[in-house]
Image (spheres, rainbow, N blue to C red):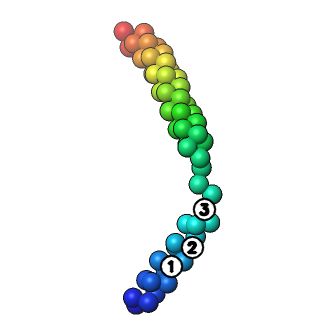
């Protein structure tokens, strides 16, 4: 069983050497994109929520 774990760890290490890791600039760019996209969606959902609240308020009152 320990031999299988050792083989697994060796193969995992070999695979990690083949990974094409993003550069720091790419990571920053992707992170800023995700943050910007999330903020944009949050604003959009906030506007839609506000509109629905106004419509419901006028229908109920």
* Image position, residue 60 (x, y; %): 38, 14
Say which residue label 2 marks: 14
**Does the CB distance between marks 2 and 1 fall below 8 Å?**
yes
10 left or right of 61 in image:
right
Image coords of residue 12 (percent x, y):
52, 73
Q: Which residue is mark 3?
A: 19
Decide if residue 28 is on the left or right side of residue 59: right
Q: Is residue 47 above or below residue 39?
A: above
Image position of 34 with respect to 17: above or below: above
Image vertical order of residue 35 relative to residue 49, above or below: below
Mark 3 or mark 1, which is nearer the start of the sequence? 1
> Is there any visible trace of residue 52 in the rendered image?
no
Q: Are marks 1 and 3 in contact (CB under 8 Å)?
A: no
Quadrant hosting residue 6 = bottom left
Residue receiving disc 1: 10
Foreground residue among 31 and 48: 31
Distance, label 2 to label 1, CA atoms, is 6 Å
Q: Secondary structure at mark 2?
A: helix
């Amino acid at each position: 069983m320990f031999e299988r774990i050792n083989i697994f760890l060796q193969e995992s290490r070999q695979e990690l050497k083949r990974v094409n890791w993003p550069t720091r600039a790419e990571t920053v760019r992707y992170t800023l994109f995700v943050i910007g996209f999330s903020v944009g969606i949050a604003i959009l959902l906030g506007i839609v929520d506000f509109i629905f609240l106004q419509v419901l308020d006028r229908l109920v009152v």
